[in-house]
Amino acid sequence: MKSHTQILLIFLFCVALLITIGFIFIYSSSSAYALERHNDALFYLKKQLLGLVLGVVLGMILCFIPLKFLKNVSPYLFLVSLCTTAATLLPYIGVSIHGSHRWLSLAGFSFQPSEFLKIFFILYCAYFLEKKQFTLHAIKHYLQLLIVISMTAGILLIQPDFGQMVTLSVTAVLLFFLAQVPITYLTITAIPVLPILGLLVYLKPYRFHRILIFQDPWKDPQGAGFQIIQSLIAIGSGGLTGLGIAQSKQKFFYLPMHHTDFIFSIIAEETGFIGVILLIGVFALFMFTGFKLASYMKEQFSFLCIAGIISLITLQTIINIGVACALLPTKGIGLPFISYGASSLLAHVCMIGIICNCFKSNFRRHF
């Protein structure tokens, strides 16, 4: 068996293992809450399973359609996903949860369009950077892509989804580096962008407050610091080996968002330091094998697609764990493959389908 095929199998094993861990701890963390709110302990697990099934179906389609076709239609897919994300701001179909307009409700189903925007944003950036790889010295091409990124960031900020905006923007910058965009362009862009980001944080009191409070959550233990404190209590309670799966105490209405943004804290409480190290190890192996697959790609588009997807998922992982451990301000970003969110799981499985498609297109005889 070729080395690149072995790397792909290890990569897919990591994905399957992370999804399995997610299902175990979604049930463990949400069963009591689901029973209280929906009279069904399996309520969130069933919805997550639906997201997985749809993700596998769409992922298979994205895996086996011709990569050249996917590349050529990526601008149109990106435009549709951008418009759909903007539609969350419309009345009647847009759904507001915790003050954010990130969901659409159609025919009784709710989903988060920005999860799919992530996929097609990366595809479009890879398409554009490959197409312009010999003319990137022309600043007009750089400005064209910068305008697209600014439009995407603007829509996400209006929702507001500051965390998603940051992760997509950082991913785009990483793709610029990989595509060898002149450093001068990036430096000139950063000069006005950094003060603007600071201003956006300062003008929204809740964002500024989050930055202040995460440094010392005990200043407001019953308010803004409550969630971080409960997360730290959960992590600290796990000790070396944890309280045991399904034995968490913080999930009983102490820690908010225990099955979504703060599921890592429940995992730490139930499996302890050893469980956390093993989980981080699986994510590290996922990242290593993912970037290794990217390095094997012969086509620029495939290389940028895989590198962009792995970068985005890695950033989300680091931010989620950092928030749970009070190392970063709260961002509202779930733990990839593990946190509850049918739209998120569906989108991440679709990303894996795209990676498999890139591999298949570059190594047809080994797929």
Image (cartoon, helix red, strand yellow):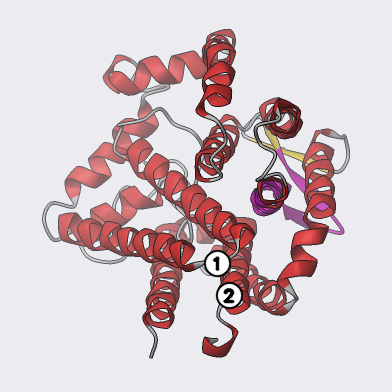
Where in the figure is residue 10, as x and y percent of width and height? Answer: 37, 76
Foreground: 256 or 146? 146
Secondary element at tag 2: helix
Marks 1 & 2, CB-CB < 8 Å contact: yes
Q: Nearer the viewer, residue 99 or 355?
A: 355
Residue 231, position as x, y percentages in the image: 32, 40
- Residue pictured at 46% horizontal, 68% vertical: 296
Q: Taking 345 as reference, is 91 above or below it?
A: above
Q: Which residue is mark 2?
A: 362
**Residue 221 quadrant:** top left
Q: Is residue 277 left or right of residue 104?
A: left
Residue corresponding to mark 1: 298
Task: Identify the element where label 1 is drawn.
Answer: loop
Can I make out residue 260 in this image? no
| Amino acid under disc 1 | Lys
Q: Which segment did they paint magenta?
A: 102-126
| Image quadrant where one finds the N terminus | bottom left
The structure residue drawn at horizontal position 54% and vertical position 55%, both measured from the top left corner, is: 309
Whole-percent x and y of residue 137? 65, 32
Q: Is residue 31 above or below residue 77?
A: below
